[in-house]
Image: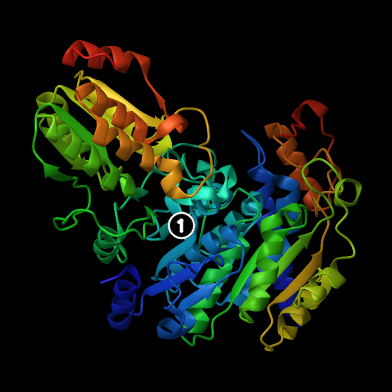
C-alpha cells in the first residue's frame, strides 16, 4: 500500500481527513479526484496553508499539509510554532525531498536543519521514515492521531522488511555488540550496506532504524551505548540538533558516556548533484571490493557521505583506541 | 437602527472604554489600538455575532478573531460587560494567576484563537471558513485586521487565496486607525488607496466610519453573497474617546500612573481633560 493509498483509504471511512498542499503535488498527485473539496491546493503560500490547517483543525479536521521540506519548515516556521505547536493542533506537516533527497536542487532546497527545528517545538512529533513502505505504515497511524507531527517524506523503495510501526518506538534490525549504527530516513539503506561490510569483516553490528527522532526511543539508544563498543549516528542533517545531539542529550540526562561517532553535515551545505553522486556510491562500492581490513570499512562509512560530511576527529582517535586500527 | 438601540450601544462602548482605560496601568496595555476598535467589537458582539456564553462552542456559531491581537483589551471589556467573563477577573490583568495579558489566548471564554504575531489570523479564519462551507453551514467568520498589519506579506497571500477558494462567508474588517506602532502608516509604508487594492484582489469592499453605529450597521448588512470574501475598511481614530491621547504616535502602548487613570476616566465622560506626565508614556 502506498502513502496515497493509505490517505485514500482513510478518507473513505473518515470525513475528517483534509489533504493540503502549497502547490507541491509529487506525493499526492492521484488524490484530488478521490478527495474533492477535501483536497486544498493554496498555491505557493506555505504560511497560508499552515494557518488554514490550524483553522480546519479547530473545526475538528485532521489536515495533512504538503510542501518541499525547506519551504514548509523554514518559510512557515513561525506559523507552525504559533498556530500548530502552541495550540497542539493535530496537523501533519509532510516535507518533500528532505536532506540528501533534494539531490541537485542546491542549498535553498536542502532541509538539513529540519529535524532540529521541528523537534524543539513543544507538542510536535518528528517521523523520518526510511522508505515508502514505512512512510505508508506510519501515516496510517499518524494521520488522525491527535497531535502535530512533522514527517520527512520518502518515496524510496524499502531495503529491509519492517516490523509494525509504533509511535515513539525505534526498530532494531540486527543485534550486535561491536558497532551500533543509529540512523533515520533513507540513509538506512546505506547503513545496511555498511552493516554488511562490517559483518563480512567479522564485526557484529546492531542496526537501529530510529524512525521517530521525537518522541525518541530512549531505551534502544541507551542499550546500544551500553552494549556496543562504538555507536555511529548517521544522518543527512547538520550535526547540531539532529540525532547526534539527541544521543548527546540522552547520555547527559542519564549520566552515561559512550563512544559515539557522528556522521553528519557540520556547518556546511552539501554539494548538489544527483543523489547517487551525492552519496559517492561508486567510490563506496570500489572500496568495498578492494577492502582488506576493518580500517577500510570505517573508511567506507565515512565514504558514505564523502567529502560533504565532516567527521569528528576525537571520534577518529576513539576508533583507533578501541579497534587498534588507524583511520 | 432605533435611537434607543444606538444609545444602548454607545453606553456599552463607553463601559468597554472604561475597562480599557483601567487596564492601562500597573503594566499598561496597547490603549490606542484598543480604543480605536472598541465600537467595532461592541457592534459585532451586540448586533452581528449572536454569541452568548452558552453558544460559545456551538458548531453553528459565528466566529470573531482578532488578528491584530494587541487590541484585546477592547474584547476583554466587551466580554466582561456581556457576561462571558466576570468583571472582577479583569483585575487579574498581567498577573500569573490568570491568562489576561497583552495578547489574546484561548483560556479566556470568547477568544477563539491566540494572536500577537501579526499576519496570522487571516489564514486561520480562512481554514475555519473553509470548513464551514464544506459542511454547508451558514455561519460566518469575522476577522479584525490592523492597518499596520497590512505590511505583512502573509496578509496578501491570504487575500489572494481566500478569493481563489471563494470564501464568501469570510468578512475581514480593517481597523483603519491610521497608525502603526511608531508612525502614521502613510509616513512609513503607505497603504492607501486601500479600496482599489482589495477590489483588485477580487474582494467585496466597503469603507465606513468605524465609530458610527449606523454606518457599521449598513456595512454588516451589505455583505454580499457572491462567491467572494468581503472586507470592511472601518475608518477609526487611534485613542478614540480620550482627546489627550487621540492620534498621538507616542500613545500606542501606555502605562499610566493610577491617578492618571482617574483623570482619563473623567476625560472619557467629557468632564475634564487629563493632564498627563510624560514619564508614563512608555512606547514599547
The answer to whether residue A10 is left or right of residue A175 is right
Q: Residue at position x 55%, y 75% from top?
A: B129
Against A106, residue B194 (above or below) is below
Q: Give B96 or A36, whichever is nearer the viewer.
A: A36
Q: Residue at position x 69%, y 60% from top?
A: B155
Where is residue A69? Give x, y as percent: 48, 52
Against B102, residue A287 (above or below) is above
Residue B188 is at least partly visible in this image: yes
Residue B62 is at least partly visible in this image: no
Where is residue A98? Give x, y as percent: 44, 50
Where is residue B15? Give x, y as percent: 67, 58
Residue beneath label 1, please? A96
Q: How many marks?
A: 1
Mark 1 crowdedness (10 Å alpha carbons): few <14, some 14-19, many ≥20: many
Against A224, residue B211 (above or below) is below
The answer to whether residue B146 is left or right of residue B185 is left
Q: Give A95 or B195, whichever is nearer the viewer.
A: A95
Q: Give A144 or B259, whichever is nearer the viewer.
A: A144
Quarter of the rendering containing residue B223:
bottom right
Chain containing the residue with disc 1: A
Q: Residue at position x 30%, y 53% from top?
A: A129
Amino acid at each position: 500500500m502506498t502513502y496515497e493509498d493509505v490517505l485514500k483509504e482513510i478518507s473513505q471511512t473518515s470525513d475528517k481527513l483534509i489533504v493540503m498542499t502549497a502547490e507541491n503535488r509529487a506525493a499526492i498527485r492521484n488524490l484530488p479526484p478521490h478527495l474533492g473539496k477535501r483536497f486544498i491546493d493554496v498555491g505557493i503560500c506555505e504560511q497560508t496553508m499552515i494557518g488554514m490547517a490550524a483553522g480546519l483543525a479547530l473545526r475538528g479536521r485532521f489536515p495533512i499539509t504538503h510542501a518541499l521540506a525547506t519551504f514548509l519548515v523554514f518559510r512557515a516556521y513561525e506559523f507552525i510554532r504559533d498556530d500548530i505547536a502552541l495550540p497542539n493542533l493535530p496537523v501533519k506537516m509532510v516535507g518533500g525531498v528532505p536532506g540528501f533527497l533534494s539531490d541537485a536542487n542546491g542549498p535553498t532546497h536542502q532541509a538539513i536543519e529540519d529535524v532540529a527545528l521541528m523537534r524543539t517545538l513543544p507538542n510536535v512529533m518528528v517521523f523520518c521514515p526510511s522508505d515508502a513502505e514505512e512512510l505508508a505504515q506510519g501515516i496510517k497511524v499518524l494521520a488522525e492521531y491527535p497531535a502535530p507531527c512533522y514527517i520527512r517524506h520518502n518515496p524510496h523503495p524499502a531495503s529491509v522488511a519492517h516490523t509494525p510501526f509504533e509511535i515513539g518506538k525505534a526498530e532494531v534490525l540486527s543485534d550486535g555488540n561491536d558497532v551500533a549504527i543509529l540512523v533515520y530516513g533513507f540513509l538506512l539503506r546505506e547503513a545496511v550496506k555498511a552493516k554488511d561490510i562490517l559483518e563480512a569483516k567479522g564485526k557484529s553490528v546492531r542496526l537501529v532504524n530510529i524512525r521517530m527522532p521525537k518522541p525518541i526511543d530512549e531505551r534502544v539508544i541507551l542499550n546500544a551505548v551500553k552494549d556496543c563498543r562504538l555507536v555511529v549516528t548517521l544522518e543527512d542533517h547538520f550535526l547540531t540538533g539532529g540525532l547526534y545531539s539527541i544521543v548527546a542529550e540522552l547520555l547527559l540526562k542519564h549520566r552515561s558516556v559512550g563512544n559515539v561517532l557522528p556522521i553528519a553535515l557540520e556547518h556546511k551545505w552539501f554539494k548538489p548533484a544527483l543523489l547517487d553522486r551525492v552519496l559517492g556510491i561508486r567510490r563506496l562500492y570500489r572500496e568495498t571490493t578492494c577492502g582488506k581490513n576493518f580500517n577500510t570499512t570505517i573508511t567506507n562509512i565515512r565514504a558514505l557521505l564523502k567529502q560533504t560530511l565532516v567527521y569528528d576527529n576525537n571520534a577518529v582517535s576513539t576508533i583507533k583506541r578501541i579497534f587498534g586500527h588507524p583511520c | 437602527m432605533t435611537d434607543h438601540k444606538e444609545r444602548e450601544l454607545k453606553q456599552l462602548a463607553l463601559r468597554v472604554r472604561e475597562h480599557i482605560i483601567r487596564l492601562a496601568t500597573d503594566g499598561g496595555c496597547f490603549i490606542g489600538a484598543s480604543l480605536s476598535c472598541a465600537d467595532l467589537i461592541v457592534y459585532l458582539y451586540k448586533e452581528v455575532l449572536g454569541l452568548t456564553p452558552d453558544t460559545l462552542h456551538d458548531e453553528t456559531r459565528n466566529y470573531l478573531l482578532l488578528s491584530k491581537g494587541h487590541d484585546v483589551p477592547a474584547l476583554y471589556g466587551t466580554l466582561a460587560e456581556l457576561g462571558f467573563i466576570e468583571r472582577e477577573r479583569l483585575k487579574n490583568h498581567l498577573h500569573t494567576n490568570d491568562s489576561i495579558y497583552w495578547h489574546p489566548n484561548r483560556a479566556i471564554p470568547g477568544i477563539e484563537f491566540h494572536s500577537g504575531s501579526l499576519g496570522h489570523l487571516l489564514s486561520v479564519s480562512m481554514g475555519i471558513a473553509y470548513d464551514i462551507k464544506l459542511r454547508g453551514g451558514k455561519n460566518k467568520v469575522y476577522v479584525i485586521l490592523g492597518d499596520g498589519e497590512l505590511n505583512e506579506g502573509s496578509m496578501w497571500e491570504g487575500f489572494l487565496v481566500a478569493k481563489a477558494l471563494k470564501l464568501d462567508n469570510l468578512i475581514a474588517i480593517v481597523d483603519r486607525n491610521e497608525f502603526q506602532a511608531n508612525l502614521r502608516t502613510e509616513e512609513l509604508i503607505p497603504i492607501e488607496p486601500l479600496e482599489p487594492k482589495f477590489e483588485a484582489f477580487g474582494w467585496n469592499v466597503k469603507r465606513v466610519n468605524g465609530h458610527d453605529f449606523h454606518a457599521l450597521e449598513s456595512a454588516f448588512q451589505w455583505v454580499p453573497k457572491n462567491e467572494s470574501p468581503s472586507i470592511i475598511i472601518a475608518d477609526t481614530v487611534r485613542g478614540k474617546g480620550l482627546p489627550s491621547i487621540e492620534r498621538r504616535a507616542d500613545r500606542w502602548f501606555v502605562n499610566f500612573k493610577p491617578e492618571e487613570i482617574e483623570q482619563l476616566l473623567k476625560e472619557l465622560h467629557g468632564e475634564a481633560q487629563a493632564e498627563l506626565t510624560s514619564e508614563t508614556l512608555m512606547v514599547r
